Amino acid sequence: MAEAINLNGVKVMVIDDSNTIRRSAEIFLVQAGCQVVLAEDGFDALSKIADHHPDIIFCDIMMPRLDGYQTCALIKKNPRYGATPLIMLSSKDGLFDRARGRMVGSDEYLTKPFTKDSLLKTVAAHVTQRV
C-alpha cells in the first residue's frame, strides 16, 4: 500500500461463518489499528452488536441459520444501526447478488477472497465519510 491508512480506534465487526476469513480480516484490521469484533453467524452478530456499537460491519452472505441478507436487513431496520456502513462479503460476484445486497441496505459489496489493501480501503472510505 503506497500510503498508510490510519484506522486507529475504528471498531469493525466481521460476520462470517469461515474461521479463516474471520481470522485473516482480524489480522489485517488489527495491524491497521482497528478494534475488531468477530461473529460467526447472524444470530451471534445480533447478540454482540448492542454491546460493541461497531463503526462498520462486514457481513458474509452465505451463512447457516440466518444468512447475510437477513442479517443485513435486521441491522439496517434498527434505528440505532441503520446508518452504520454494512459491507456484504461473498465469493459470488454476480449482478443479482450485488442488487439483492443493495435491496436489504448494504452499502458496498466486497468479493472474497479480499486483499488487505481492499479491506482497509473499504473501511477507510466508509469511516472517513462519517467524520
Image: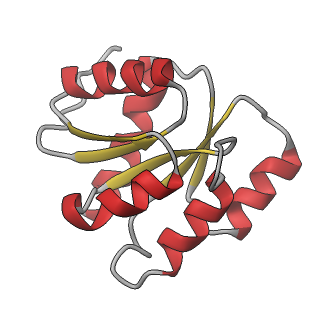
Residue at image location 29% in from the left, 53% down from the top: 128
- Relative horizontal placement of residue 50, taking residue 116 as reference (left or right): left
Q: Can you name the residue that lies furthest to the front here? A: 65
Give the position of the C terminus as an image quadrant: bottom left
Q: What is the quadrant of residue 62 in the picture? A: top right
Q: Residue at x 15, y 30 (%)?
A: 33
The chosen color scheme is secondary structure
Looking at the picture, tell me which residue is in the foreground, 74 or 117: 74
Q: Residue at x 64, y 42 (%)?
A: 63
Within the image, what quadrant is residue 6 found in? Answer: top left
Side of 34 relative to 116 (left or right): left
What residue sits 21% from the left and 26% below the top?
A: 30
Q: Is residue 65 above or below residue 37?
A: below
Left-right relation of 80 to 11:
right
Vertical relation: 83 (above or below) 21: below
Q: Quadrant of the N terminus?
A: top left
Instruction: Tell me where residue 83 appears, x and y as whole percent.
Output: 40, 73
Q: Position of residue 69 (x, y in %)?
A: 67, 59
x and y percentages locating residue 50 in the rendered image: 27, 68
In this rendered view, identify the residue nearer to me: 19 or 106.
19
Residue furthest toward the bottom?
A: 79
Task: Say whether residue 46 is left or right of residue 70.
Answer: left
All told, the count of numbered labels is 0
